[in-house]
Amino acid sequence: MPETNLSTTQFALRHPGQHSGHRPRTVLVLGGGGMRGMAHVGVLRAMRTLGIEYDAIIGTSIGALVGAMAAGGVDLDEIERIIRDVQKGDYFRLNFLKLLMKGTRAPSMFKGRTFRNRLSEMVPDIHFSETKVPFFCNSVRLESGGSVYWGTPGFDDISMVDAVYASCALPGIFEPLEWKGFNYMDGGIVDSVPLRFAKTLKPELIIAVDLTIKSAYKTPNYKQRVLQTLYRSFEIVEEVLVEQSLHMHVDHTVALIQPKVGHLHRFDFAQVGEVVQAGEDEALRVLTSHAATRDLVRSELIEGLACPVTPHDYVSLHIDPALCIGCGMCEVVCETHGYWAQGEKASVRKHQNYECTRDHACARNCPTGAISLGNL
């Protein structure tokens, strides 16, 4: 896709005079993660509290839903009300008849029509050119495996509802969207936190929300429930792809927000309020302490918001020598050379790693759990 199509010229035309002064041109990236994505509402709430604005939104899967509402001009309080009223039955209705008649030949487990109808009640019925700020969301073309970004030239003559549905259509869960002879499904399959696309917009600052980090890893009940194994397999691929994306694209211009919601299931509807709050808490902590954003915070005092104690510019690395077996995986996967794996035990090279991309690859790949990370 030609870079000129998505250049800063588009921002200047859509938002004249908005980039004066010190405020950097900012792209907000809202990643995928099922119901964990309700944390995006908390992030938006924190940005409003701090007075941090954005000039474009890129959403994946659930991030596409929240992003479409925000970019479409839906009031944040209304977005939160809609999100808090979400019920599992609004989205998931079994394709019972098709499953009964076709078995594994059924197009999906749940009725895509039910999901799309609910989306039509939430997403503004507007054209991509009518959004408050430029909005893009990604999908994967089933035929080629390639990514598309709805809202870009050639992919902006689709309804906002269909674009969001296509970005949320998890394979096997909902039917892919058929559009102009091709089929499209969840963009999170290949790029759950689309930083590479964000950088083609030539922003000065990227605020990205990553919901893929797990606080614990559990063995699925694969002997009795094959779907649990399939879901976990999807998550593993997603985690590895996000690791690689963070390795390549997180730098000093990216404020990465990783709400503490990894312990929740992708389809957990029971803790929406807590998830929203977790997103707000983490966004407040990161945005008030990260070097790229802390000078953007409005100067007036905000009740209940304390000044940050520790800058969020680095990650502290730790190895428990009693658990380390010297396998060397930490050195293999750390793209910022935070570890030495020489001799019988590995050692830390950067106890305060300012280059760390916060991908958690070292901890996730350590087979004995010897590695722990701090200041996250």
Image (cartoon, rainbow, N blue to C red):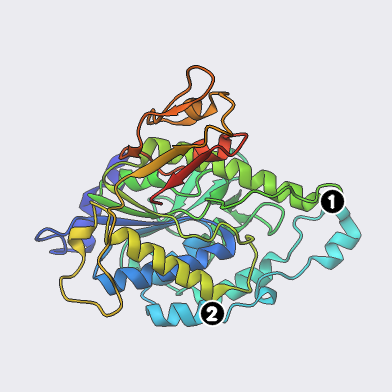
Q: Farthest left residue?
A: 21
Front residue of this view, candidates 86 and 360: 360
On screen, residue 23 above or below 66: above
Q: Farthest top residue?
A: 343
Q: Position of residue 67 (x, y in %)?
A: 42, 65
Q: Position of residue 184 (x, y in %)?
A: 59, 51
Question: Which residue is label 1 attached to?
Answer: 104
Q: Crowding near pointer 2: few (<14 within 10 Å), some, many (20+)?
A: some
Question: Which residue is label 2 attached to?
Answer: 84
**Residue type at the position of mark 1:** Thr
On screen, residue 110 above or below 211: below
Q: Position of residue 331 (x, y in %)?
A: 47, 26
For the N terminus, the quadrant is top left
**Residue 142 appears in the figure:** no
Front residue of this view, candidates 351 and 195: 351
Q: Position of residue 202 (x, y in %)?
A: 25, 46
* Residue drawn at the location 59% of the way across and 38% of the way down: 144
Instruction: Using the rendered view, name the quadrant where residue 168 is placed.
Output: bottom right
Q: Which mark is residue 91?
A: none
* Residue drawn at the location 36% of the way across and 75% of the way down: 73
Is 168 on the left or on the right of 93, as rendered? left
On screen, residue 199 above or below 84: above
Q: Crowding near pointer 1: few (<14 within 10 Å), some, many (20+)?
A: few
Tag 2 or tag 1, which sits nearer the N-term? 2
Circle 1 — which element? helix
* Residue drawn at the location 38% of the way across and 43% of the way down: 316
Closer to the camera: disc 1 or disc 2? 2
Circle 2 — which element? helix
**Residue type at the position of mark 2:** Arg
Is 267 on the left or on the right of 322, as rendered? right
**Residue 214 appears in the figure:** yes
Marks 1 and 2 sit apart, C-alpha to C-alpha, by 34 Å
